[in-house]
Amino acid sequence: MKTVGASEFKARCLRLIRQMNQDREPVTITNRGRPVAILSPLPEQTQTSSIIGAMRGTVLAYEDPFMPGCRAV
């Protein structure tokens, strides 16, 4: 894990973020030698399907609850 001081991080923030994204290694940011933050890459995203429409075609029966004469179950 890399360690950089807060002032160096401030001066080279974008470069450190790009490098961290490439090598996937977290960066510890220190203030006067004490760790104050850890910058880490996001976990790899997996392909997930949308939940919108995921249940399409699974309803077997439907009764209109607003239809006159319909009773609650």
Image: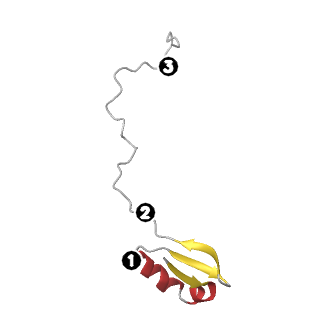
The residue lying toward the viewer, choosing from 47 and 29, is 29
- Which residue is rendered at x = 59% and y = 79% of the image? 29
> Would you name the residue on which mark 3 appears?
65
- Quick check: 70 above or below 62? above
- Which residue is rendered at x = 46% and y = 69% of the image? 41
Task: First in sequence, mark 1 or 3: give its number.
Answer: 1
Circle 2 residues within 10 Å: few <14, some 14–19, many ≥20:
few
Circle 3 residues within 10 Å: few <14, some 14–19, many ≥20:
few
Q: Mark 2: which secondary structure?
A: loop
- Which residue is rendered at x = 53% and y = 13% of the image? 72
Q: What sort of colour scheme is used for the picture?
A: secondary structure
Q: In the picture provided, is 38 more to the left or to the right than 61? A: right
Label of residue 43 in the image: 2
The residue lying toward the viewer, choosing from 48 and 34, is 34
> How many angstroms separate mark 1 from mark 3 (CA)?
57 Å
Return the x and y of residue 61 as percentages of the image width and height.
36, 20
Return the x and y of residue 3 as percentages of the image width and height.
54, 81
> Would you name the residue on which mark 1 appears?
23
Disc 2 vs disc 3: Cβ atoms closer than 8 Å? Answer: no
Outermost residue, left side: 57
- Quick check: 49 above or below 37? above
> How many angstroms separate mark 2 from mark 3 (CA)?
45 Å
Q: Mark 1: which secondary structure?
A: helix
> How many angstroms separate mark 2 from mark 1 (CA)?
13 Å
Q: Residue type at mark 1?
A: Asp
Q: Mark 3: which secondary structure?
A: loop
The residue lying toward the viewer, choosing from 36 and 33, is 33
Q: Residue type at mark 3?
A: Pro
Q: In the picture provided, is 48 more to the left or to the right than 27? A: left
